[in-house]
Image (tube, rainbow, N blue to C red):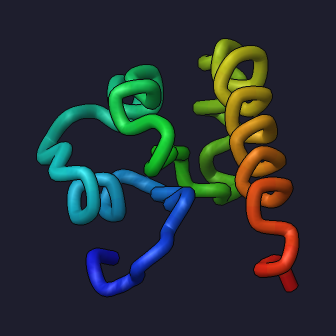
Amino acid sequence: MQRFERLSLVIVLGSYAMDYHLGTGKTPLTRVVEAWREHWPQAFPLPHPSPRNNRWLVRNPWFQQDVLPALQARVQAVLTANPKETP
């Protein structure tokens, strides 16, 4: 990641990626995702988008209520800040 010169946002999916990129170690995924503001605005830790995680989504309704709107707003901000660089 450090080789990329102008990364505005890195979406970090799943606990293995969180450990590798954010150095979260054995911190539970839920705790890392709840603390997403600690990595803001450069990185955004998210659970892996696997159907196996549907139960996690049901048990954690705050994710869809709080985290996803913030992510959507951040993606929109990144895209509008660099309109010539989007595909």
Question: In terms of depth relative to the viewer, which is nearer, 77 or 64?
Answer: 77
Quarter of the picture containing the N terminus is bottom left
At 65% from the left and 59% from the top, the residue drawn is 50
* Image side of residue 29 versus residue 54, left or right: left
At 20% from the left and 34% from the top, the residue drawn is 27
**Vertical order, 48 against 86 (above or below):** above
State the image coordinates of residue 72 (x, y, percent, origin top left): 79, 40
At 46% from the left and 57% from the top, the residue drawn is 12
Question: In terms of depth relative to the viewer, which is nearer, 83 or 26?
Answer: 83
* Image side of residue 22 versus residue 36, left or right: left
State the image coordinates of residue 81 (x, y, percent, origin top left): 76, 56
At 45% from the left and 49% from the top, the residue drawn is 43
Question: In terms of depth relative to the viewer, which is nearer, 52 or 63?
Answer: 63
**Number of dots carrying numbers:** 0
**Vertical order, 4 against 60 (above or below):** below
* Image side of residue 35 versus residue 11, left or right: left
State the image coordinates of residue 54 (x, y, percent, origin top left): 70, 40
State the image quarter where residue 71 is shown. top right
Quarter of the picture containing the C terminus is bottom right
**Vertical order, 62 against 5 (above or below):** above
State the image coordinates of residue 45 (x, y, percent, origin top left): 46, 45
State the image quarter where residue 8 is shown. bottom right
